[in-house]
Amino acid sequence: MKSLIFIFLFLLTLSFNTQDAQTQIDFEKVSKCIVPVISGKKLGSGIYVKKDIVITAYHLKTLLDLVIPLGYHSVHILCPYPMDILGETPIILKEYPLNDLIVLKIKKQKHKVKFSKRYESGQGCWIIGYGMGVKGVVHGYVYGQRRVALLIDAKVISGMSGGGVFNSEGELLGMFLGAFKTIDYLPFALSSEAIERYL
């Protein structure tokens, strides 16, 4: 009897995973709120959260080390390298280094994103960003949540940092940041709840 219950539960789980894998996201529509971000030699992604407000990962901000010689000594001054979004240098409105978030104002207006109010473990998600400088999408699953971080099970590419993590309805679950080195390189995102709090 126990073996029949286990087989039933296994088949039920398999049917849910197959159903989620077949669900598609409207890539053309949802990806309109994703923009490429260039900072020095770093490539990443950004998300339009309002018509003229873009958020991206703070770690994309590049610092230049200017060396000014003063006689026998020299002074090192770290200054930010200007970011480029769609050929424009944005204005930095807010910075949250501990949460890896930077809020930027840009003149060019695009489609703003719709925030998701809910997510659960096992839910399918899609990460949209400029991996290796090319806009693309990666499918994965929400693993769980740890404070403001949304843990994700997905294979991601360099350059996806700052990109959006979306549900099947095209709502923003979070902003992709990278991978925890301490948890077998498990990818994570800043949750949409945290993003709305910091805006």
Image (cartoon, rainbow, N blue to C red):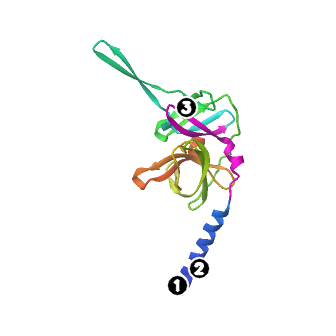
At x 55%, y 46%, the residue is 176
Q: Label 1 crowding class (10 Å Cα cut-off): few <14, some 14-19, many 20+? A: few
Measured from the top left, where is residue 117 in percent x and y? 64, 51
Q: Tag 3: residue type?
A: Lys
User: Looking at the image, which is closer to me, 138 or 8?
Assistant: 138
Q: Eyeballing the image, is 40 above or below 6?
A: above
Q: Bounds of the magenta span?
A: 24-49
Residue indicated by mark 2: 8
Measured from the top left, where is residue 13 in percent x and y? 59, 71
At x 29%, y 16%, the residue is 73
- Of the 4 image quadrants, the one containing the N terminus is bottom right
Residue indicated by mark 3: 94
Q: Tag 1: residue type?
A: Ser
Q: Eyeballing the image, is 162 above or below 41?
A: below
At numbered mark 3, what does the secondary structure look like: helix, strand or loop? strand
User: Looking at the image, which is closer to me, 169 or 83?
Assistant: 83
At x 60%, y 60%, the residue is 123
At numbered mark 2, what does the secondary structure look like: helix, strand or loop? helix
At numbered mark 1, what does the secondary structure look like: helix, strand or loop? helix
Residue indicated by mark 1: 3
Q: Is residue 172 magenta?
A: no
Q: Tag 2: residue type?
A: Phe
Q: Eyeballing the image, is 181 above or below 123?
A: above
Q: Determine whether, in the image, residue 62 is placed left or right of residue 109.
A: left
Measured from the top left, where is residue 74 in percent x and y? 32, 18
Q: Is residue 26 magenta?
A: yes
Between the C-alphas of marks 3 and 1, the distance is 56 Å
